[in-house]
Image (cartoon, rainbow, N blue to C red):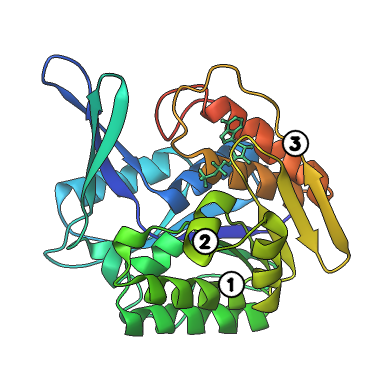
Amino acid sequence: MTQRFLAIGECMLELSPAGEGLLATGFAGDTFNTAWYLRKLAPEAVDVAYFSAIGDDAPSREMAGFMRQSGITPELIERKGGHIGLYMISLKNGERSFSYWRDTSAAKTLADDLTTLPVADGDTIYFSGITLAILAPKARERLLGVISVARSQGVRVVFDTNLRPRLWASHDAMRAGTMEGASVADIVLPSFEDEADIFGDLDKAATAARYHGAGCTTVIVKDGPASVLVSTPKGQTEIQPQTVADVVDTTAAGDSFNAGFLAEHYAGQSLEAAVEAGCKVSAKVIGKRGALVAL
Ligand code: ADP
């Protein structure tokens, strides 16, 4: 098992409807959600850590406190006068919609002066397409360079492509940035629907082939309720997720899948067993409301 799992990205303050004009607060964000679920699933001995930048205000401090309370080691750069990003969930006729205020968040500066990451031989770095999308081009290059150096020193790298067109300057920039992310990763965890949309992949095998072409050895292509493709240079298999009769909220389906997959994979199980574990975790998560649910 890996000694340290370091997720890199943006965790935000979440505001969600709590009845009669009230809002409940929480903290969430794609890479953070994976760290949070992994903390629940991995053995105590694994240090699950979160790398980002925050401000020096009360919400920033509360977020760091929430990480600690959740058993996650905060690796947070503090920016004087900065603040964390925010999103709000609105409910209309049972449908959820999301509004974001993250353009000026401290997390966007997480790689501005980065020279090294707090990882060593045998550890794992986890990042996503959202991690890359929020950074300015130079900072993105810097982060990928530092990840690449860590990888050459024995750190394993896992990348969820998490394609979010609204966060990128253009579709071309998103496609180029995503492929660069995959080029420094050992494991890529894309979701087929988005990949087909953005890259025009005709099937999951095409998605896998494209990421293998970028230099990544293991590609796990998720596809909502449809089968998950496991692709390595040795061959491909498909695993069918269990049927979930009552899908309540698919928020964090992919993030929690990744945590279930990684916990099992790093415990030494086969890729197939790890995918089955990922499916089981996400089946529980989509049966309840919210990004972070009790398993
Ligand atoms: P993302 O949230 O990244 O778009 P997916 O929608 O592909 O990820 O889902 C990730 C995993 O969550 C799937 O591989 C599957 O195990 C589970 N999942 C998602 N939607 C459903 C569903 N409707 N029924 C059953 N399982 C689902």
Q: 150 or 210: which is nearer to us?
A: 210
What kind of element bears circle 3? loop
Disc number lying in front (1 or 3): 3
What kind of element bears circle 2? loop
List x then y, in percent, for residue 89.
25, 34
Name the residue that disc number 1 marks: 182
Q: Is residue 231 above or below residue 97?
A: below
Nearest to N terminus: mark 2 or mark 3: 2
In space, the residues marked 1 and 2 are separated at their CA atoms by 8 Å
Residue type, label 3 = Gln
Query: Would residue 248 be visible to someone looking at this image?
Result: yes
In space, the residues marked 1 and 3 are separated at their CA atoms by 25 Å
Residue drawn at x 46%, y 44% as measured from the top left: 33
> Is the residue marked by circle 1 packed among few (<14), some (14-19), or many (20+) residues within 10 Å?
many
Task: Identify the residue at the far right of this view.
Answer: 234
The answer to whether marks 1 and 2 mark residues whose Cβ atoms lie closer than 8 Å is yes
List x then y, in percent, for residue 289.
41, 24
Residue type, label 1 = Ala
In space, the residues marked 2 and 3 are separated at their CA atoms by 21 Å
Q: Is mark 3 within 8 Å of ligand 1?
A: no
Number of callouts in the render?
3
Name the residue that disc number 3 marks: 240
Q: Left or right of 39: which side holds 155?
A: right
Name the residue that disc number 2 marks: 161
Nearest to N terminus: mark 1 or mark 2: 2
Q: Quadrant of residue 182?
A: bottom right
Residue drawn at x 40%, y 76% as measured from the top left: 172
Disc number lying in front (2 or 3): 3
